[in-house]
Image: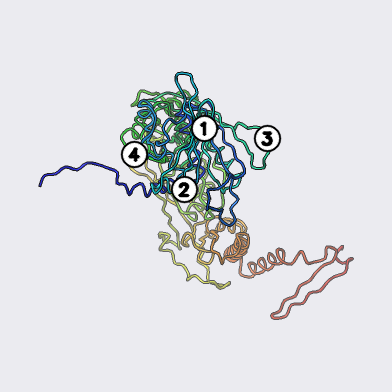
């Protein structure tokens, strides 16, 4: 069977027209202002007044405080009222339709609200034409009833269009929506608040050029790109301005190496190749043009960077620019010094200041966990080569000076037990326990940390570093499972070891039933100092230190300033003796 078919719009589609838009103030203002601009208006006036009379048989819902919002312009007006309800049809000339892909659906943004339209078309012969007025309700948009058009002597004069609709939003919400719509709109928008009655002078809403602040601008296929340096922006912020309607197209961002962040915005001038998803135009169609646009926007950023005195491009970005004939200066041979990571993710620290990466620099091309990193840093400081350690930066791969640096690819640890050397994971450890007097690991005779160094060329070599401390416990565990190994000849003091334990293992819980960060930290500090004192001094010293610390933190504030306090504890009894003022003074 041979037959042909052709696209058509079924009449039931009209029954769903009220669902094309959400009928928000943002939708209505955006669509209405776009139509005013296309109509050649010189300005738009938005006024808010007390509600007008409602159609017979309708009443406001409980709790409503309706206001009437009127949007009026001095454009060419509407010659045929039928175009308002002829979805997909518009009265714009062919050139404008080609340039902006005007779809003829924007007026449907008012379909859920009662609205009145008054218009007087412009006569190109100079005479004044009669105006008209029509009241539209949802059933008119749905094709369920005919809308009666009336003559209107009060229509905008000498020509223009006025649209009024009901709004249950607050006056502040209405003004905010109007300000957002006017922010990058090419025409002045005047706002009048007549909700309280009386005369109110119109106030022109603030506007700002979309590309204001750009350090570089260039045209491209009916668009204008504006490039910004270190512009503050949020995720999915608008980066294209379609005649006052901001859209998010996810134009490229270029992150530099230890430098600025470059972004790009685009302004539509005359770009028929840009296709927006109809009817609301809130996103772009992902097509070949959009891909070319993003590539062109990136090149615009590169041209702006080429004019900057210190662009610091990543190698990949510099190569892309060079392929396009754009010469961007390479970054200097500087890196951030390496610093050991800490277990507390809330412990934010300023990154180290950039430093020259000399020929003897070691790039940390591995990412040790906090316990391993803290032990390595202490050993590197004691051995005098901590200043040679630098952070790896993958963005610099490809630059000759960076690729020529030696890299630390792996870290290994050997521990001496008597005359035998063994890997850290083979060193005998006692079972972990929460008991205060749980067994501690034996102190080894020596510790060596090996850095597997990979040069730019040639075989791997090992840098053997003596150490007096490593941690045998699992990373990201609590103090109970931390197993510090401290050599017999180490001069490490308890408070130093406690600080290292804190950096290596303290990772507070954010569960709802956990104590506060401060409480968890205080508890960890107490346990860490107790463990360090037991390991380096004795159980008795650890006990004395823990009790003294608890008294200092919890009880000292209760003691009189001018009297001595003696506390005697023999479980379960506690005896407190207060000395005299003279005794305290002596």
The answer to whether residue 502 shows anywhere in this view is yes
Residue underneath mark 2: 112
The residue that appears at 53% across and 68% down in the rendered structure is 440
Label whose residue precedes the other's in the sequence (2 or 4):
2
Along the line of sight, the residue nearer the viewer: 13 or 224: 13
Label 1 CA crowd tier, 10 Å (few <14, some 14–19, many 20+) = many
Q: CA distance from mark 4 to mark 3?
A: 49 Å
Residue underneath mark 3: 199
Q: Quadrant of residue 104?
A: top left
Q: CA distance from mark 1 to mark 4?
A: 24 Å
The figure's colour scheme reads rainbow
Is residue 146 found left or right of 66 in the rendered image?
left
Q: Position of residue 275 (x, y in %)?
A: 35, 35
Q: Tell me whether circle 2 and circle 4 mark residues in contact (CB < 8 Å).
A: no
Residue underneath mark 4: 286
Q: At numbered mark 1, what does the secondary structure look like: helix, strand or loop?
A: loop
Q: CA distance from mark 3 to mark 1?
A: 28 Å
Residue underneath mark 1: 184
Label whose residue precedes the other's in the sequence (3 or 1):
1
Q: Position of residue 357 (x, y in %)?
A: 47, 35
Label whose residue precedes the other's in the sequence (2 or 1):
2
Checking the image for residue 17, the label placed there is none
């Amino acid at each position: 069977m041979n037959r042909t078919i052709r696209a058509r719009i079924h009449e039931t589609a009209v029954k769903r027209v009220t669902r094309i838009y959400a009928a928000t103030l943002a939708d209505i203002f955006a669509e209405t202002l776009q139509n005013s601009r296309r109509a050649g208006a010189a300005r738009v006036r938005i006024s808010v007044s007390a509600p007008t009379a409602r159609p017979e048989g309708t009443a406001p819902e409980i709790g409503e405080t309706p206001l009437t919002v009127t949007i009026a312009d001095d454009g060419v007006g509407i010659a045929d009222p039928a175009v308002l309800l002829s979805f997909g049809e518009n009265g714009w000339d062919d050139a404008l339709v080609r340039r902006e892909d005007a779809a003829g659906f924007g007026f449907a943004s008012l379909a859920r609200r009662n609205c009145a339209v008054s218009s007087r078309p412009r006569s190109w012969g100079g005479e004044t034409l009669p105006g008209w007025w029509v009241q539209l309700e949802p059933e008119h948009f749905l094709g369920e009833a005919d809308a009666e058009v009336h003559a209107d002597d009060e229509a905008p004069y000498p020509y223009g269009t006025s649209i009024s609709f009901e709004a249950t939003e607050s006056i502040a919400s209405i003004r905010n929506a109007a300000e957002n719509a006017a922010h990058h709109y090419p025409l002045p928008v005047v706002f009048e608040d007549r909700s309280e009655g009386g005369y109110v002078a119109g106030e022109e809403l603030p506007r700002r050029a979309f590309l204001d602040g750009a350090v570089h601008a260039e045209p491209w296929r009916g668009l204008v790109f504006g490039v910004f340096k270190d512009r503050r922006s949020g995720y999915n912020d608008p980066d294209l301005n379609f005649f006052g309607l901001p859209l998010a197209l996810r134009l490229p961002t270029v992150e530099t190496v230890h430098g600025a962040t470059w972004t790009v915005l685009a302004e539509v001038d005359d770009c028929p190749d840009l296709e927006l998803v109809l009817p609301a135009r809130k996103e772009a169609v992902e097509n070949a043009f959009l891909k070319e646009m993003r590539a062109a926007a990136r090149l615009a950023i590169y041209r702006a960077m080429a004019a900057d005195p210190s662009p610091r491009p990543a190698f990949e970005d510099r190569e892309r620019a060079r392929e396009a004939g754009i010469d961007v200066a390479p970054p200097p041979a500087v890196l951030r010094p390496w610093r050991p990571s800490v277990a507390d993710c809330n412990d934010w620290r300023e990154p180290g200041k950039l430093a020259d990466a000399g020929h003897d620099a070691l790039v940390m091309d591995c990412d040790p966990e906090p316990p391993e990193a803290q032990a390595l840093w202490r050993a590197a400081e004691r051995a005098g080569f901590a200043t040679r350690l630098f952070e790896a930066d993958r963005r610099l791969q490809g630059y000759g000076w960076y690729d020529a640096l030696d890299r630390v690819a792996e870290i290994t640890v050997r521990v001496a037990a008597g005359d035998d050397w063994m890997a850290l994971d083979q060193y005998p450890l006692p079972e972990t326990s929460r008991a205060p007097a749980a067994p501690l690991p034996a102190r080894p005779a020596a510790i060596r940390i090996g850095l597997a160094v990979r040069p730019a060329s040639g075989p791997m070599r090992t840098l053997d570093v003596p150490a007096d401390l490593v941690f045998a416990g699992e990373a990201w565990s609590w103090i109970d499972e931390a197993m510090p190994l401290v050599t017999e000849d180490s001069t490490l003091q308890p408070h130093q070891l406690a600080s290292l334990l804190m950096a290596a293992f303290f990772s507070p819980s954010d569960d709802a039933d956990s104590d506060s960060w401060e409480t968890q930290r205080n508890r960890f500090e107490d346990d860490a100092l107790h463990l360090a004192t037991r390991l380096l001094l004795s159980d008795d010293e650890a006990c004395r230190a823990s009790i003294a610390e608890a008294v200092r933190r919890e009880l000292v504030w209760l003691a009189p300033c001018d009297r001595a306090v003696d506390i005697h504890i023999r479980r379960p009894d506690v005896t407190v003796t207060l000395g005299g003022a003279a005794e305290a003074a002596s």
